Amino acid sequence: MSDLTAHPQTLDVDLGERSYPIHIGAGLLDRPELLTPHIPGRQVLVVSNETVAPLYLERLLKSLDGFQVETAILPDGE
């Protein structure tokens, strides 16, 4: 197991009221506790493309269980 899998790194972007963390590591899509606290409501729009969506969309949707999720899959290059 890589160190980033066991211990993801967090980079805090300091923008005052608009500050946010960036989590760097493996397996983060399977850790909803890192994502869901930053979603202010119960509705989510996931925008992806035809190359990335088949690789990661299902895992992301599992992490968003309990949210009302819509997806928009765009052609590559858009």
Image (cartoon, rainbow, N blue to C red):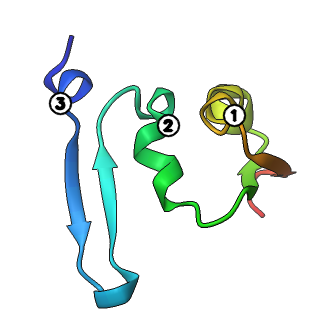
Q: x, y percentage for residue 42? A: 72, 56
Q: Which residue is mark 3?
A: 7
Seen at 68% across and 64% down, the residue is 41
- Comparing 17 with 45, the one in front is 17
Determine contact: label 1, label 2, CB under 8 Å. Answer: yes
13 relative to 51 in the view: left or right: left
Is 30 located above or below residue 15 in the figure? above
Q: Which residue is mark 1?
A: 65
- Comparing 40 with 31, the one in front is 40
- Comparing 73 with 77, the one in front is 73
Q: x, y percentage for residue 49? A: 75, 48
Q: x, y percentage for residue 57? A: 70, 34
10 relative to 70 in the view: left or right: left
Q: Amino acid at mark 2?
A: Pro
Q: Which residue is mark 2?
A: 32
Of label 1 and label 2, which has the lower sequence position? 2
* SS at circle 3: loop
Q: Amino acid at mark 1?
A: Asp
Seen at 43% across and 40% down, the residue is 33
Mark 1 vs mark 3, foreground winner is 1
58 relative to 56 in the view: left or right: right
Categorize mark 3 by other alpha carbons within 10 Å: few (<14), some (14-19), many (20+).
Answer: few
Q: Amino acid at mark 3?
A: His
| Quadrant location, the C terminus | bottom right
